Image: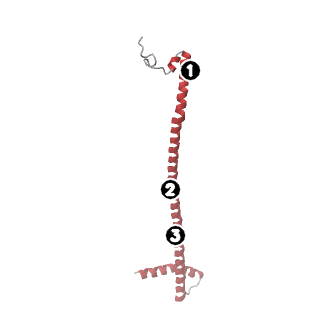
Amino acid sequence: MAARGVVGIFFLSAVPLVCLELRRGVPDIGIKDFLLLCGRIFLLLALLTLIISVTTSWLNSLKSSQVYLKEEEEKNKKRQKLVRKKQQEAQGEKASRYIENVLKPHQEMKLRKLEERFYQMTGEAWKLSSGHKLGVGKYSHFIF
């Protein structure tokens, strides 16, 4: 069955070259010439098959390398996202420490100074002192 297919392909591949030979004006083709022609066609087909297989494997390797490059790009993007996220977290921690250690004390001190100035301007400077409790001190044992 397979032998018939090979013979069929062999003769079908010879048909175009036979037509070309007949165009040239060589009407008397013998069996030997016909077999040589078929052999040349068979070699031509083998050469074309080799070229196609090499070319397709080369193209497939280029595609796989492009796929590999795409995978590498995706990995790099994921790494970059992770690094950016870590950097943002670090910057957020720095910002919160700065707010806690620098800005809040500075704002509290500013507010305290404004409050002191307000009380001094309104004449209520006594509100600025911490004061002391009654009944505590050196005269606490005397009752008036």
> Which x, y percent locates residue 40?
55, 82
Q: Secondary structure at mark 2?
A: helix
In depth, the one of 134 and 94 nearer the eye is 134
Note whether residue 30 is visible: no
- In the rendered structure, the answer to whether residue 122 lies left or right of residue 139 reads right
Whichever of labels 2 and 3 marks the residue nearer the N terminus, that label is 3
Amino acid on which the number 3 mark rests in the picture: Ser
Q: Residues within 10 Å of mark 3 (few under 14, many from 20)?
A: few
Q: Are marks 2 and 1 in contact (CB under 8 Å)?
A: no
Distance from Cα at disc 2 to Cα at disc 1? 61 Å
> Which x, y percent locates residue 103?
54, 33
Residue located at (54% from left, 19% from top)? 118
Q: Is residue 9 above or below residue 82?
A: below
The residue that label 2 is drawn on is: 75
Mark number, residue 108: none
Residue located at (52% from left, 78% from top)? 46
The residue that label 1 is drawn on is: 117
Q: Is residue 85 above or below residue 14?
A: above
Q: Secondary structure at mark 1?
A: helix
> Which x, y percent locates residue 4?
42, 82
